[in-house]
Amino acid sequence: MGVNLKPLTLPEEISLDTLKGKTIAIDAYNVLHQFLSIIRQRDGTPLKDASGEVTSHLTGLLYRTANLVEKGIKPIYVFDGKPHPLKMETLHGRKEVKDRAREDWERAKERGDMEEARKKAQQTSVLSKEMVEEAKKLLEGLGIPHVQAPGEGEAQASFMCMKGDADAVSSQDFDCLLFGASVLVRNVAITGKRKMPGRQKWVDVSPERIVLQDVLSEHGITREQLVDIAILVGTDFNRGIKGIGPKTALKLVKKYGSIEEVREAEDIGGLENVYEVREIFLNPSVARDYSIKWRAVDEGKVVDFLCGEHQFGEERVRHAIEKFEVFSKSLGQRNLFDF
């Protein structure tokens, strides 16, 4: 979910074609959760194979990644490691929300309210360790690189962007800006039509690009001050101050310079672990030694895994594989493209 910085950002609507030739570090957990949430049957039940194993994450990963490479985009998937201890309260809160949504989902199905059932079902998605390993296995078969972060995947992806190994980070969360990503692209994994919650209305969802330096320049702040703004609002690692939203936090930090000065001048209490939360964003735990290689797709491995183990339709899978084959050929001698 991340921190709410949307009112302060300057999103520019773009098309996927704009990202042709670009290397994009994708927040893997973020997109896999999206696939698990969105790719469901009418009553909200996720897609499953004959054994009852959920396959929504694999469906989304295959076909969405196929669309990206077809556009000439070079994706790198970055996976979360161990969550920071300060994030545990947030994670427990999310679990409680999912548990309540699961109960509401069952009740909606019982009374035949399929729209409500699907809406509640989308809030119940759980990404298991097995699903993560399956996603990595599929990516390896497709020849798409993935990087394991020691901590937050967003931090790792942002570090890769700062280092120049990626042109942008793809995530729905604005936290990437706090972690230092120079460019954040949103809606890359969910481009298309999206139904408005609780309404019979569909809207177009397009990718958007946010440039960190543009945000900082527009508001006359530093990245360190942007982090302080986020802490005042509340992040995955701390509770913010009740009644303080992004715009109010911006005014306070611009007026006083830092959280310490804000607390003293405004007599604000309730903020804990400020220094530690700052360090999470400004000096996160990241892997500095990693390998990024795009390889030729292993058609047999992918077909055996998806069609043999999970009963995917072979014709559709082979059609998607063709896009990866064209992609690897487009790299020429660089299909072992290496940083």
Image (cartoon, helix red, strand yellow):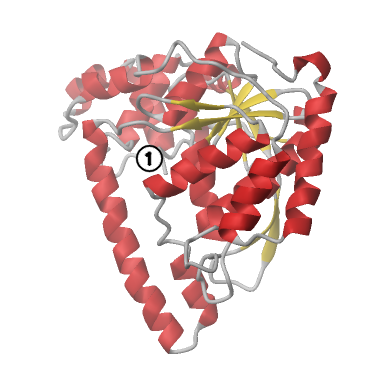
- Relative to 218, is 77 above or below? below
Secondary structure beneath dot 1 equals: loop
Instruction: State which quadrant residue 315 falls in.
Output: bottom right
| x then y, percent, for residue 54 | 49, 60
Q: Nearer the viewer, residue 126 or 90?
A: 126
- Relative to 306, is 49 above or below? below
Q: Which of 316 and 207 is in front in this view?
A: 316
Identity of the residue furthest to the bottom in this view: 111
Residue in view at x 57 percent, y 21 percent: 218
Residue in view at x 47 percent, y 76 percent: 117
Residue in view at x 41 percent, y 36 percent: 246
Instruction: State which quadrant residue 279 falls in.
Output: top left
| x then y, percent, for residue 89 | 22, 43
Q: Nearer the viewer, residue 32 or 234?
A: 32
Is residue 296 at all visible to an observer of this figure?
yes
| x then y, percent, for residue 289 | 46, 11
Residue in view at x 74 percent, y 20 percent: 335
| x then y, percent, for residue 17 | 81, 34
Circle 1 crowding by C-alpha within 10 Å: few under 14, some 14–19, many from 20: some
- Relative to 295, is 47 above or below? below
Which amino acid lies under the numbered mark 1 shown in the image of this protein? Gly
* Tally of numbered discs: 1
The C terminus sits in image quarter: top right
| Relative to 268, 321 lies left or right | right
Is residue 190 at all visible to an observer of this figure?
no
The N terminus sits in image quarter: top left
| Relative to 303, 198 lies left or right | left
Judging by the rendered image, the residue that carries numbered circle 1 is 245
